[in-house]
Every structure is written in C-alpha cells, then in structure tokens.
Amino acid sequence: QGDPSSLGVEASEARARLTALLGSEAEPRPQQADYASAASAAFQPREEAGQATVVLAEAGTGIGKTLGYIAPASLWAEKNQGPVWLSTFTKNLQRQIDQELDVLYPNPVQKARKVVVRKGRENYLCLLNFEDAARAMAGRTGDAVALGLLARWLRCSRDGDMVGGDFPAWLTGLAGRGRTLGLTDRRGECIYAACPHYKKCFIERGIRQARRADIVIANHALVMTMSAMHATLGGDEDPNLPPRYVFDEGHHVFNAADGAFASHLSGQEASELRRWLLGAESSGARSRARGIKSRVEDLIDDDDDPVLVDAILRAARALPGSGWQQRLASGQAQGPAEAFLAALRAQVLTRAGDRDNGYGLECAVAPVDDAVLTAAAALDGALDRLALPLLALAERLAKRMVDDAADLDTATRLRIEALCQGIARRGGLTLGGWRQMLIELKGETPAEFVDWFAVERIDGREVDVGMRRHWIDPTLPFATYVVQPAHGVLLTSATLRDGTGDGEADWSVAETRTGAVHLPSPALRAEVPSPFDYGAQTRVLVVTDVRRDNPDQVAAAYRELFLAAGGGALGLFTAIARLRAVHGRIAGPLEDAGLTLYGQHVDALDTPTLVDIFRAEEDACLLGTDAVRDGVDVPGRSLRLIVFDRVPWPRPDLLHRARRAAYTGKGYDDMLTRLKLRQAFGRLVRRGDDRGIFVRLDGALPSRLLGAFPEGVEATRVGLAEAVAETGEFLAP
C-alpha cells in the first residue's frame, strides 16, 4: 500500500472525533475528552529516526479510554492511509475493542474492510484440517453432526477465529475438542502457498487485510514476536510493520515481553523442531505434517541441494523423538538432545525441594553437574551439524528467487519466501539461541539474563524438561525492537503507576515496567483520574477469622458472601486447585438458592464466553483466576461483589528472585501485589451508578498494600459474620 503520510492529529481534532463517536445525546464526559487530547500526542509526526513519540497515559476506571484512543487513532489512519495497531494482553479486551468499534463503523461490510483482528495461528480453523476431517468422515460417522455444524459456522464466520471469536464455544463441549478446536492450525504443519485453500485461508487473509486496514486489533505477544523477527531477520525498514501502536493493558507489557523474548531449550520445543524437519515419519503418528524434504523437493534442482536436505534429515534425528518423556523417566535416553535433557532432569531432581508437591520443579544452573556439561558439548556439536545445512539451503532457495525471477510463478515465490523465513527462524534464531545457552554453561550467564533448569509438571505428571533463559529486564528488547522503530506509541492502562503515594516514584515504576527508561527521549506523561466516587460507591472488607489453609472454611465464606449478595459475584483465586475445590463445595448450595455458578477451568467454555454469560445473567456467580481479573468489563449489578481468596504475592521462583534482587527488593514484591489488587478492584465499578463490595479472605494484608485502593476508600478488618451482614445490607436493591 505504500508508506503512510505523516500528518498529525491535533488535540482539538481528537476531541471533535470523540464527540462524533459518542453522539449528540451522550452525557458530557470531560475526563474522556481530556484523555483523547492526551492520547493524540502519540499521533504527531516523528522528529528523528529511532525516536518514537511515546505517551504513558493512566486513565482511571470509568474514563472510557477505549473510545478515547480510538478517536485519534482512527483519525490518524484516515488522514494518512496507514494502519494503527491496537494491542491488548487478553483476548477479552480484544473482543471488547472490536465491539466498541461498531460505533465508528456501524455498517458490518465497511467494518470488515476497516477493522481486522489478529491473533496467533493456533486460534484459527485450518481449512485443510477441516477438509481432511471431512474426507475421513466415511469411516467415522459419529463426526458428521459436529462437522456439519462446523461447516455452517464456516460459511458465516467473520475470520475463522475459534478462540474468543464468533465460534460457538458450546460446540466444543458437545462434540469434543478433537472435532472442533483440534482442527485449528497446528504448529509446524502449515504448507502455506502449497495448500489448495491458501487464498481462502483465514490466517493468510487476515495478514493481507491487516496491510490495508485502518485498525488492527492484535495482542502484545504477536506484536513483539513480529517486530523481533523483523529486526533479527529483516534488515531494513519493513513497510508491513505499523508506524503507530496503542498498547492497552500497558501494565502487562513487561510480562508479555518476558514471554516473547525468552529462549527455551526444552523437550517439547526440540521435538517440535524435529517434527517440522522430519514430518510425520518422525513419530509414526497419523498426521499430514510434511518434513523439510517434501516441502522443498519440487523447489530444488541443483545436484548439491539434495545433499543438503539429506544432511538436514540425518542431523535432525539428534533431536528428541516420539516418546522422549517416557525414555527420560526410564533412563533410556536416545541421542544427544535426550541425553542432555536426562542429565538436566537429574540435576533438577537432585537439587529441587519438595519433589512431592505435584507442581513444577526448578534449580539454578550453577554449579553445573559434569554430566550436564558433557551432554551440553555433545548437543552443541549436533545442533551445529543441523544449523549449517539448514542455513545453506535457505541461501540456495533465496538465490533461486533471484536467478529464476522471470520463470517463478507467484505461488512458487510465496512458498520459497515462507520456507526461507521458516528456516531462518528455526535455523538461525532458535538454534542460535540454544547453542549460545549451551556454550555459556561452561562459564557465567550474561548479566542481562537469568538461566535455570526446569521440570514442568501438571498434577504431578511431567510434561516438559528443559533449560530456560529470560531477560532480567525484558522491556529492553521491547523498547529496542518494538518502540524505537515506530513513529508513535501510546501505552495506557488504569494501573500504569504504583500506589505508594509518592508521585514521582510511582511514575518511575510506570516508566520501568513499560521500557520507557530505555528510550533516548523521555516519554510524555498523562494522568486522567476516575470520575467515580469510590468512597460512597464501594466498600473494602478484610476478613480476619477465616483460615486460608482450610478449604472448608474458605468455601463456606464464598458461599455465604455469594448468597448475601444474591449473586452478581466474582470469586478470584491465586491457584486453580483452590478454585476447583471451592467450586465443588458451593455449586450445589448456590443452585438450591437459585444462583448459577460458573467456573473457569471447570466449565468447558473459553473465558470470553464465560464472561459474556456472567455479564448477561444479573444474578450469576463466576470463579476465575488472572484471565478474569484483568481486562474484563461487567457493568451494572451483574458484578457487585468480588471475593479474593488470598493476598496475591508473587511466586518466589528463580526468575522472580533474580528480578527482585535487580530492582527494589521487597518493594518489588509489594509493587507487583498492589498492581494485582488494583486490577481486581477495578472490575467492581464500571458505571456511575454501580455499587460494589471488595472482600479479601486473608487477614494478612499489610497496610502498605492499601495504596492499591483509590483515595477515599478505607479497608475495614472484620469477621466473616460481619462481612456477610454488611454485604447483604450494602448491596440490597
């Protein structure tokens, strides 16, 4: 589409666009207009290359920040003929923003052209998977109903999104995961332009549409991965990278960057690479996964190319094959990768404490066992023998695109380009990162990283083993790869700052957690306070006489509080096991009282669907964890009570301890905990006439954490009986 223009959006223009979006009958909201004015600063022309205009904007709950930033964002897109990417941390907020854009584009046809929702490939139905399932239906007639319903959905789906999109989540519970979500795009199986459905593919169509759209609703992980891939593999400026970003849920940028820029040398990751290289023959499993040979055999003709492919296939067998978990557990590791994982696993099991807790285990890398060092050296050599022919093959394929430019049709060029990118990502980035980690095992971990060994377990069952490397400050690569190449970036949230009461210190936390401290120019700051009277509209109760380690007492507290509120209650948990335990104990009594109880990790529905049901049913109750706590908008009496089981202290794992040492010690823990409390409390009041009670079932709530609550809100320490009585009285209709 060409580069967009560089026309700016003035504050007065943003206010005018906001007024048009709200309509003439909307009540005056001066704070929202102030916020739109502040956000417009991120849509001014860039003055120097590599120096994006960055705005940190904290907007209190009730401001209406979504329309507040949509106003200048949409105006900039129209004036400059370029896309603005709106990025979120949760799928809940992606859906909410998409719904808000109905105000800007009331015509669905126009909206389909102007707005695109982008997620990871694993969220979308693969048409080739669906075709394969339909062909196999003759031998599995029980699939007919599920596939028939899926076909009806396919014909009217906006974008094929099966996770948080327009897919009916109830169908998974009815037909089973394999017949529904099992047909999404599986990792490593896509054959890109060689697929007969390539032009109709939901994923590829979304990528193409995003280049022509005005607004792209993405998520933090996708944005960061895309930018990092371009920075390390792309070279010059990419016209497909957007010049303007809005990061909503900006307080999650740190966590998103932590996941996006980490490197994991694990059994699952390595076996996935082997599967991509060898295809289904590596495991004997029923799969249409194609290995590197079948992907390139009709694209190569040089005598040396088949030799490279054969070398890749031989070297790939050094990676873990099917059944590697069982072989590690039984001491029968095969090949250098499994030998390294087995030695690593032995070190973890020897040094980790509380091996019987059923959760994951970890240990520090140093001092490294001699067996691990020996196995690491052997694996490094094996990875070198794999990387060399892989990268050489990519060079030959890229050379063919130049030498045979006049003869290659578009589909072939697309296949070669996708294959070159896939090889570069795996052969260059992934293998390069793994080799660096292995080499540095002999010395010291670089100061900017923290390394550790881990055995991941679910309900006591081992699911992965590996070495992990994370940035101590992941906002450094975020600032380098995402923010600095852009022209303008808005980072916004209701909880950007800390709540210590020291204004400059609280802003310093916002700059540290968003990466603004790493930018050559200081970020602009904007604060727009909430219009709500929290002191009159809310109550905060800390229950002091419930033993948090007694599941019966905790469940009884949830039951009585939910009954006192008459529903409209959200129960938040810091652990899935405790959520399930409480759900099992209170579902029956609540049902007897006419109150429906839903549970994340209990009901076979995705979180956005659960929230939609909870929002629609005024007296329903919902139990959830972090995904429900953040980015959920439930206005009115549908949410009038929040009960949090424990103080959400961060888990003191090796990564957290390294960061705590690098930042502010115990103050770092306090900051993270206040952030979670602020986010949870922010779910309670979403409109001017909302009223609600926030209950903490943990008397061990230090006073230094009370800054998480808005000014004018006092936390009262009470017994359970008093909390139940006050809940019923305060929330009475």
Image (cartoon, rainbow, N blue to C red):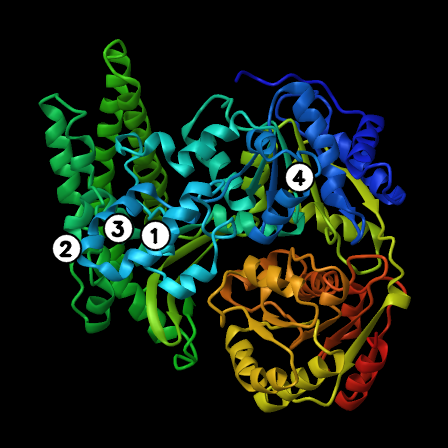
CA separation in Å, label 1 and label 3 = 11 Å
On residue 284, the disc is 2
x 59%, y 38%: residue:
479
Residue 645 lies in quadrant: bottom right
Amino acid type at circle 4 is Leu
Residue 218 lies in quadrant: top right
* Residue 116 % position (x, y): 54, 35
Residue located beneath label 3 in the image: 133
Secondary structure at badge 1 equals helix
Task: Answer above or below: position of 652 versus 29.
Answer: below
Is residue 562 shown left or right of residue 692? left
Q: Closer to the observer: label 1 or label 4?
A: 1
CA separation in Å, label 1 and label 2 = 30 Å
Which quarter of the rendered picture does the C terminus lie within? Answer: bottom right
Residue located beneath label 4 in the image: 101
Amino acid type at circle 3 is Ala
> Is residue 660 at least partly visible in the picture?
no
Amino acid type at circle 1 is Gly
Give the residue at the far top of this rendering. Answer: 406
Q: 109 and 461: which one is in front? A: 109
- Give whichever of discs 2 and 3 has the lower sequence position: 3
> Is residue 50 at least partly visible in the picture?
yes
* Residue 371 % position (x, y): 25, 63
CA separation in Å, label 1 and label 4 = 32 Å
- Give whichever of discs 2 and 4 has the lower sequence position: 4
On residue 148, the disc is 1
